Image: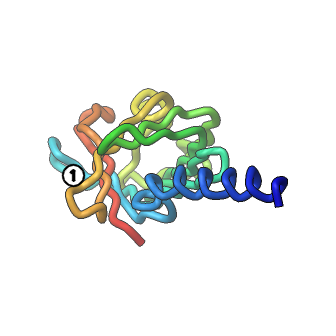
Amino acid sequence: MKRLLPAALMIALVGCAHRELMPVLGRWNGQLEVVLGEKDSGMKGYLMLYATHKKFLLHFEGPQEAMDLSGNWTLKGKQVLMDVVDQKFDDQGGEEKRDPNKPFIPVADLRQAFGKSMVLNRGKDDQTLTGPPVSLGKLQVRQSFTRQ
């Protein structure tokens, strides 16, 4: 019985630690929302926030490009702080295959805007996550996610 008490206490503490994270864990559907500029970014995707080792996976895809970012995240008050560890970009065939009539965001612009630390602000109802505006080429965009 004396040996079970420390184990039960550890399980209770772990459960309490994840309770604070529960409102943000899981899948969030989103897009790069244009806040300044004349066209739609065309980038839609999702964010996965995992409790295990506090890892995240962010995927955005447009008509002619895609990006996958992964790393570590922490919760600080009403903000989700994400540190990018791994980046993968795909320009889907390069310049030779690019359609000039469809939106395109150069990989260099994506890397500069999202290849480092990011902050997402939690909505009042914990059903939205929104990033601050960032420069993406000639556009100002922000990440906008809703709970899946």
Q: Nearer the viewer, residue 41 or 21?
A: 21
* Numbered disc 1: secondary structure: loop
On screen, residue 118 versus residue 115, left or right, reads left
Residue hosting label 1 = 39
* Image quadrant where residue 124 sits: bottom left
Question: Relative to residue 52, is residue 115 depicted above or below?
Answer: above
Residue 19 in sight in this render = yes
Q: Residue most toward the bottom?
A: 148
Report the front residue among 77 and 93: 77
State the scheme by which the image is colored: rainbow
Q: Is residue 66 visible?
A: no
Check disc 1 and give the amino acid type: Lys
Q: Position of residue 134 (x, y in %)?
A: 28, 34
State which quarter of the image contains the C terminus. bottom left
For the N terminus, give its image quadrant. Answer: bottom right
Q: Residue at x 62, y 41 (%)?
A: 88
- The local crowd at label 1, few if under 14, some if 14 to 19, many if 20 or more residues have their Cα within 10 Å, is few
Q: Is residue 76 left or right of residue 84?
A: left
Q: Which is nearer the eye, 135 or 124?
A: 124
Q: Residue at x 62, y 52 (%)?
A: 14
Please state the total of marks drawn on the protein image.
Answer: 1
Which one is in front, 41 or 18? 18
- At 54% from the left and 47% from the top, the residue drawn is 67
Image coordinates of residue 70 in percent, x first then y, are 60, 43
Residue 140, image x and y in percent?
23, 38
| Image-quadrant location for residue 23 | bottom left
